[in-house]
Amino acid sequence: MPKECEHFIQERNVSQNTKNCEECEKEHLPVVALRMCLACGHVGCCDSSIGKHATKHFEETGHPIMQAVPEKIWKWCYIHEEYY
């Protein structure tokens, strides 16, 4: 994995704001996996899920970095489209 990009300066010491994708719960959609925004703690579903709510959160807010949850074994930068 490459060295973390400059977008990680936006990373905050945040906690998950929920244990589920709230958008999927409201829309009654299945979730494949969860992603947490490292700028604000929003939890959304991954791009393999129907809703793609983590990516939609990035598109709406511009928050560029997220992490797989609950395992937290990798991070992703939407700007560079790269794992860290």
Image: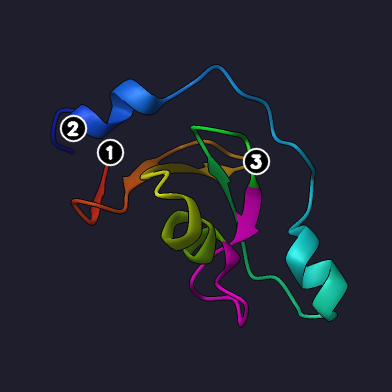
N-terminal label among 3 and 2: 2
Membership of 44 in magenta stretch: yes
Please report the bounds of the magenta region as a residue range: 43-53
Membership of 83 in magenta stretch: no
Left or right: 49, with 74 as reference point: right
For label 2, the residue is 5
Q: What secondary structure do most residues of the magenta stretch adopt?
A: loop
In this view, which residue lies farthest toward the left?
Answer: 2
Left or right: 50, with 3 as reference point: right
Vertical placement of residue 70 versus 10, above or below: below
Left or right: 43, with 3 as reference point: right
Residue 40 location, quadrant = top right
Disc 2 + disc 1, Cβ < 8 Å: yes
Please give the count of numbered marks on the rendered protein. 3
Disc 3 + disc 1, Cβ < 8 Å: no
For label 3, the residue is 70
What residue do we see at 45% from left, 43% from top?
A: 66
Q: Which amino acid, by three-letter code, is at mark 2?
A: Cys
Name the image quarter holding the C terminus.
Answer: top left
Q: State the SS at label 2.
A: loop
Q: State the SS at label 3.
A: loop
For label 1, the residue is 84
Q: State the SS at label 1.
A: loop
